Amino acid sequence: MRRDDFIDFHYVEPQQLAMHDRLLNWARYVRVKPILWQAPIWRLGKSKGRQWHEPTIAEPTDTLDGHAIEKAVAALPELHREAIRWHYVWRTTPAHARRVLGVTNEGLQRLVVDGRSMLTNRRI
């Protein structure tokens, strides 16, 4: 594969930036978070970790918009739906997504861009 054959999957067309932001919110809404188990005896104790590490504030998630986008993504055609989920939620390599979907690099990028366009045109 030549150097100029690479595709930048992080590039978003200017007219799709608003939908891209909503899809990032949707990804935070649907992404599965690990549940950390803690013994009952330690639940009431305060962690002293905050005195060593600066607390990080996570970006807030709009759950109503996330749910609306999830319904719209679920209604997309199968390949577009899976490409959008790969791009925003799963975070695997493009090679893995290409194998699963059975498309080329260009086809994968086209599915993501077209999926975003379909969601924009639905006016959700």
Image (tube, rainbow, N blue to C red):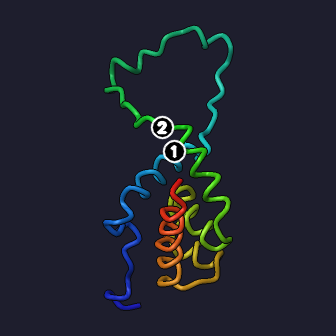
Q: Quadrant of residue 79?
A: bottom right
Where in the figure is residue 119, as x and y percent of width and height? 53, 62
Q: Vertically, is 97 above or below 61?
A: below
- Rendered image: mark on residue 28: 1
Q: Amino acid at mark 1?
A: Arg
Residue at 38% x, 20% y is 50
Where in the figure is residue 108, as x and y percent of width and height? 52, 78
Q: Amino acid at mark 2?
A: Thr
Q: Earlier in the sequence, mark 2 or mark 1?
A: 1
Label 2 packing within 10 angstroms: few (<14), some (14-19), many (20+): some
- Quarter holding the N terminus? bottom left
User: Horizontally, is 55 left or right of 29 in the view?
Assistant: left
- Rendered image: mark on residue 53: none
Q: Vertically, is 5 above or below 37?
A: below
User: Horizontally, is 92 left or right of 55 in the view?
Assistant: right
Residue toward you, 40 or 30: 30
Q: Are marks 2 and 1 in contact (CB under 8 Å)?
A: yes
Residue at 34% x, 69% y is 13
Say which element carries label 2: loop
Where in the figure is residue 26, as x and y percent of width and height? 53, 48
Say which element carries label 1: helix
Q: Vertically, is 31 above or below 42?
A: below
Q: Quadrant of residue 77?
A: bottom right
User: Horizontally, is 69 left or right of 3 in the view?
Assistant: right
Which residue in the protein does label 2 denote? 61
CA distance separating discs 2 and 1: 7 Å
